[in-house]
Image: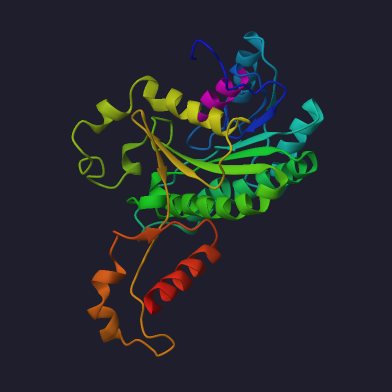
Amino acid sequence: MSEQSTVRLDDRVAVVTGAGNGLGREYALALAERGAAVVVNDLGTDVRGKEVRVGDHPADRVVEEIRMKGGRAVASKASCSTYEGGQSIIATALDAFGRIDILVHNAGFLRNRSFADMTEEQFRTVIDVHLMGAFYTAQPAFRAMMNSGYGRIVLIGSAAGEFGSYWQANYSAAKAGVVGFMNDIANEGAEHGILVNTVLPLATTRLGVEEDDWAPGFFDAAPAGWAQELLVPDHGRDFVASMVVWLASENCKGTQNVYSVAGGRFARVFTGVTHGWLSNFPQAASPEDIEANLAEIEDLGRFTAPKVLYGEFEAILQNRANART
């Protein structure tokens, strides 16, 4: 922490899903350190879905760690992958602290397999936790935030959802869905003081710890020395937690943004649309016309980054107006 703490969460109440270990634990601890009361949600299973020993629940351990440092925290052991579980998680915050100001949806796991071999269960369970879990927890939180006129929702995405991966069609689809989900509820939440952003973290976690979880040669294709350079210090977790805390704070005024946090670099990720080629609309363009103008269609030198789908329409209309002058 810097010498003078200007990002504070005093009197705020936060919920963090998947907060028993790894990044989720770091988020919960960092939010509590800045003054927030925290609901530490964790289902209490290991990376393979096996339940932990009785009396050794990870949510309880993190709650105790926060309390030992003078913070306020309670545990939630419901699953975010069901409607009832999501309702229960948010109800825990309302019952214990009377409000919810911050939701960090972090819970997740991997079920990596080649697309040709991936089972329906492997695809669906990942979607259920990462994407459906965002809906199940964010909706009751969003409603409560609407009533109070304030809220911060931080969704944990992945570069896999933005740029693609291998053996992760389920995970990539879920994380891409998280960004699409953010885009809509950020627009809907703005008038109610609810800001929604997404973080793409790079850090070592328990996910994908088994060697056969990864495509052959997956890591061989990565740049030389990437792990040593990008996963230190503290496995990259403290860097990610700092971004999550800032996005969860009143200091943050932006919404509908995606941020990459990797190797000490913080960067905004965005979806853009090229200026493109203007055909003689409404006269139909032929496949040959498209082929002839492909370089202009794909030219990345000129682009816009709409915040809502109408933004793309505005760019098209402006391009047509400019073409007429």
Q: How many marks?
A: 0
Q: Relative to 53, say whether 270 is above or below.
A: below
Could you tell me residue 299's position as x and y percent? 28, 64
Q: Quadrant of residue 260?
A: top left
Residue in the foreground of this view, choosing between 293 and 226: 293
Decide which of 108, 325 is in the foreground and name it.
325
Q: Which residue is pictured at 39% across the width and 45% down the height?
A: 159
| Residue situated furthest bottom in the rendering | 283
Taking 163 as reference, is 69 left or right? right
Q: Main secondary structure of the magenta part?
A: helix
* Residue in the picture at 48% in, 14% down: 2
Residue 230 x, y percent position in the rendering: 30, 29
Query: Is residue 127 in view?
Result: yes
What is the quadrant of residue 34 in the picture? top right
Query: Which residue, as the protein is rendered here, is positioned at the far front?
Result: 325
Queried whether the magenta region covers residue 105, the answer comes back as no
Apparent side of residue 50 relative to residue 146 in the rendered image (left or right): left
In the picture, the quarter occupied by the C terminus is bottom left
Give residue 6's quadrant in the image: top right
* Residue 221 position in % (x across, y down): 21, 44
Color encoding of the figure: rainbow
Left or right side of 287 for 209 = right
Residue interval drawn in magenta: 22-32
Placement of 127 over or under 30, stated as above or below: below
Residue 31 lies in the magenta stretch: yes
Q: Residue furthest left?
A: 224
Regarding residue 22, the answer to whether it shows in the image is no
Q: Position of residue 41 (x, y in %)?
A: 64, 31
Q: Is residue 172 left or right of residue 186?
A: left
In front of the other: 274 or 153: 274
